[in-house]
Amino acid sequence: MPRIILVSGKGGTGKTTVASATGLATAKQGYRTLVISFDIAHSLSDAFDLERGLFDQNQGLPLRVTENLDLQEVDVQEDVERHWGDVYRYLATIFTSTGLSSVAAEELAIIPGMEDVVTLLYLNQYMVENTYDVLIVDCAPTGESLRFVSMPTTLEWYMRKIFGIERNVMRAARPIAKMLTDVPLPDESYFAAIQRLFKRIEGIENILLDPETTTIRLVTNPEKMVVRETQRAYMYFGLYGMNTDQIIINRVFPEQAGVFSRLAARQTAYTAEIAEYFQPVPVTQLPLFEDEIIGMARLQEVGHALYGDEDPSQCYISSPSYTFKKDGQDYLLEVVMPFVQKEEIDLTRQAEDLVIRVGNFKRHVPLPRSVVRLKTAGAKMDDGRLIVRFVNEVSR
C-alpha cells in the first residue's frame, strides 16, 4: 500500500523545506512521489525555485519537477469549482442575496475547511488508484493540521447524524419558503453534490489512522515556545489517533557559534529535553545551513542530512495511539496522551462514543459493541497513557 507522510509543526519551523527534501529523497530511491500542499500560503514552488507566477499553482494539479517527483499546490478556487460546484454556487448565491457584490460572494463561498476536504479527496483518489508510492503532505501550521486530520470524523458524523434530517427538512420547507422569502434554499443538486463528495473521501479516515500507512513527522526548533507547541501537537495528533514516527529539530547552531554561543548553549539544552520528551520517537537534528535552502541541489543536501542512505519512507514507529483490551470481565481503553495531567482531561459518553476533551480539542473514540453497553468506571494516567475502565454492573 502507498505510504502517507504528514509533515507538520509550528509555522516558520521549516516544514516545507523538510517535506520537499523528503520528497526528493524518496524519489531518488525510485519511489513515485508526490509532495502536496494545502496551506493557503503555498511555498513548495518557491522551495524548488521554480519559475512560476506569484499565484500560479498549475490550477491545483500535479506538476512534474524531476524524475519520480511531482508537486501539487491545492488551488481551492479551482478544485471546489471542479468537485463541489453546486455547493459553491449555492453559497455564492446566498452571499449575493445579502447585498454583497458577486466578486466578494465568490470569495466568501470558499468557507474554512474546503482546502482540507479537497486535499483528502486527492489523497483518497491517489491511494485507491495507486498513482504514487509515497504521498508527502506539506501541512499548514499545527492548528490547521489538526483540523485537517479531524475532518473525516467531522464529515462522517455530519453525514450520519445531520445530513438526512437536513435534506428532508429542506424538501418539506422549500415550497413554503418560496412564498415567504427571496433567499434561496438549497435544492437537490446541493445535497447530491455533498453526498457525491463524501463518497469520494469515504475510507480515508481508516487510511489516516493506519499507523503503518500514515505517520506524522513534526518539525520543531530548539526554542522554548516552539518545543511547547510541538508537545501539544504530538499529544493532539495522538488524541486523534495519528502516529508520530519522527521529530525533526531544524536550524541547530554548531557548538562553536562565536557570538551566538549563548544561543547555541540554550539550543543544546532544548535538544536534550526534546530527546527525553518524545522517547521512543526518533529525533533527528538538522543544522543551520550557511545559505538559504532554495533549489533542488540545496534540498538534496537537507535530504542527505536527514536520512543519509536510509529509506525515507520507512515507518520509524508503528504502534496505534489507542487500543482496547480485556481485563477479566472489564474492558480497558488505552489512549496515548503524553504531557497531559489527569485533571486536564474531561470524559463524557455520547451514544456510542467516548468523548475525550483536553482544552479546546476533543476526540470521539467509537466504542465497540461489546463496550457500548458497559458503564465507564473510572480513568487514570499511567506513563503517558490514559486508561479508561468499562465495567458490566449486572455481572458484579
Image (cartoon, rainbow, N blue to C red):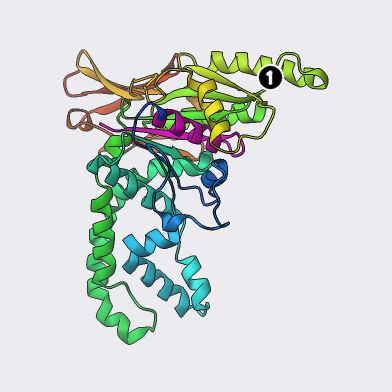
Q: Residue furthest bottom?
A: 179
**Where on the picture, by quarter, is residue 69?**
top left
Vertical comparison of 109 with 223: above or below: below
Task: Please state the horizontal and vertical placement of residue 222, each as a whole percent of the image.
Answer: 64, 24
Q: Is 371 displayed left or right of 110 in the figure? A: left
Q: Nearer the viewer, residue 79 or 191?
A: 79
Residue denoted by label 1: 267
Q: Amino acid at mark 1?
A: Gln
Q: Quadrant of the C terminus?
A: top left
Categorize mark 1 by other alpha carbons within 10 Å: few (<14), some (14-19), many (20+): many
Residue at left offset 56%, top offset 57% = 53
Residue at left offset 32%, top offset 49% = 121
Q: Is 230 displayed left or right of 335 in the figure? A: right
Task: Please state the horizontal and vertical placement of residue 376, each as a whole percent of the image.
Answer: 30, 27
Q: Quadrant of the N terminus?
A: top left
Evaluate whether residue 339 shows in this view: no
**Where on the picture, by quarter, is residue 193?**
bottom left
25 within the magenta span:
yes
Q: Is 311 displayed left or right of 186 in the figure? A: right
Q: Nearer the viewer, residue 231 or 75?
A: 75
69 within the magenta span:
no
Evaluate whether residue 280 shows in this view: yes
Q: Which residues are magenta?
A: 1-27
Report the number of discs.
1
Task: Please state the horizontal and vertical placement of residue 4, each as a whole percent of the image.
Answer: 36, 34
Task: Please state the horizontal and vertical placement of residue 197, each as a whole percent of the image.
Answer: 28, 56
Mark 1 residue element: helix
